[in-house]
Amino acid sequence: MTEIKYQVFVSSTYTDLIEERENIIKAILEMYHIPIGMEMFSAEDEDQWEIIRRTIEVSDYYILVLGLRYGSKTTENISFTQKEYEYALEKNIPVLAFIMNDSVSLSKDKRDDDLTEINTFREMVLKNSKMAQFWKKKDELIKNVSISLMKQIMQKPGIGWVRGDKAISAEALSHELTSLSKENRSLRDTIKELESKIIPKYPKIELSINALVVDSKFNTYKRLAVPEKININDVDEHLKEHISEEEIRQYNDSIPSQSEIDEYNSKYEQFYKIKGYSSYLVLTVFNTGTVKANNLYIDIKFPDEVLVIDDDKRMEEPQNPIPYTPIKWAETRYEKTLQKDKNTNSMLNSLLNPGYGGIGTILQPRFNMPKIRPINQQWWTKLDGNKLTLKINSLLHTRCFDLDEEYLIVPLKIGKHSVEISFICEELETKKKQIIELDVQEKL
């Protein structure tokens, strides 16, 4: 056991961190060093600042523990804890900072209603103290304090205190160095042992999406073009008595513009691919981490080249914007004069077939009955445009979650398309991201 005792100043707010301070002081004493802090002073009496200041000056190390309370203030309108911290920095006292994670659930008496001041202080500490560590539980804090203090003593030994009768002579210095070398090895072994017990445990979330396959007919849908206007001189002689110039004028006036044709073609392409190439979206969420993920939110942003829709959505063929040509009506009238005994209604019905390039038909929806989803308290989904949000209440480590038969996924273009995914849960401090490449290719 070394005869040098290091003085360690422990600084924090008091009432909200009583247990933590007591355990830190106990840990320092068990290391045979000298803890000292605000318990020895009246922090509300600013006349005592000179005593606190001198105590910090002769301390070898300064430990700062921050919770979610800013603490009582000095006449300079800063907390006593912040004033002590700034003075330790000014005097180049080695600072070990431990900051409580702001996601820890605390009672009202242990956190400020307005966290503006404490957050500003926390940002200052993170900026000035590069080795600051976050903590959530008391046991984790005490282990981290013990390890960090031992490392600091090894790397930057302070002046320390010795008994008056133990002042090291030149002869004793050699013996002391030998003893310190042995203690150094022992401390290194202790640090390794303690570090091995602090194994961070986090969930590790990943997601997979089913593959998309198309065939050679994927882009063979029929596209419309703007029809040419009709002139009476273009009508066959035998049909002229069955068509009027007014009908031709009305037809020519109702011919859609190029932009209207383009809009129809775009809608029809989507309708064609939904009808022929939609499949159920199958999502599998894996937790390959070491702990359960609670309140897991997953945002999945699909690219424009892939469409995601609710499987209850009814799909109707867009209406053909090209009007029925009066020449066809003239042919109908001409046929009626030749075949009066034919069933006119049957003929008219046949003329309404899309094969004539006329009025489009309404297809039956792919799913005639809307899907009734049971109320499920374990998970829910929300589709907003091409962004799908999936919330899972909890997902055990080494387990997976499957989502299928909720939504349809539709490829709109061949090629590789990136899906952006982000994960967040109670156990993760920041969002984690994942990119999935959907490779849409023709099936051979």
Image (cartoon, helix red, strand yellow):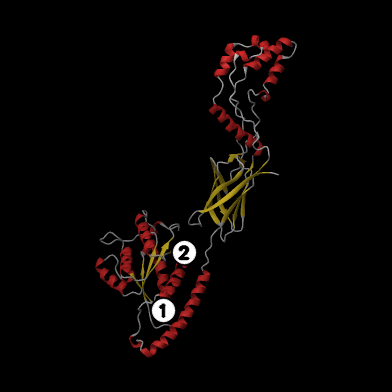
Residue bearing mark 2:
137
* Residue 346 in picture, x, y percent from top left: 72, 17
Q: On the rendered image, what quadrant is the C terminus found in?
A: top right
Contact, mark 1 vs mark 2 (Cβ under 8 Å)? no
> Residue 336: in sight, yes or no?
yes
User: Looking at this rendering, what residue extends furthest in the front direction?
Assistant: 233
SS of the residue under disc 2: loop
The image shows residue 68, relative to residue 319, as above or below, that is: below
* Residue 416 in picture, x, y percent from top left: 60, 46
* Residue 124 in picture, x, y percent from top left: 36, 60
The image shows residue 119, relative to residue 329, as above or below, that is: below
**As drawn, is 331 to the left or to the right of 159?**
right
User: Looking at this rendering, what residue extends furthest in the left direction?
Assistant: 47
Q: Dot 2, how many residues are within 10 Å of its Cα: few (below 14), some (14-19), or many (20+)?
A: few
* Residue 103 in picture, x, y percent from top left: 45, 57
Mark drawn on residue 32: 1
Q: Residue at 60%, 13% (x, y): give it.
A: 232
Q: On the rendered image, what quadrant is the N terminus found in?
A: bottom left
Q: Dot 1, how many residues are within 10 Å of its Cα: few (below 14), some (14-19), or many (20+)?
A: some
Location of residue 46 (image quadrant): bottom left
User: Looking at this rendering, what residue extends furthest in the right direction?
Assistant: 341
Q: Residue at 58%, 25% (x, y): give it.
A: 226
The image shows residue 179, relative to residue 323, as above or below, that is: below
> Residue 314: in sight, yes or no?
no
Q: Could you tell which of marks 1 and 2 lies nearer the N-terminus?
A: 1
SS of the residue under disc 1: loop
C-alpha gap between disc 1 and disc 2:
24 Å
Instruction: Report the front residue among 296 and 178.
Output: 178
User: Looking at this rendering, what residue extends furthest in the bottom direction?
Assistant: 171
Q: Amino acid at mark 1?
A: Tyr
Q: Amino acid at mark 2?
A: Lys
Location of residue 325 (image quadrant): top right
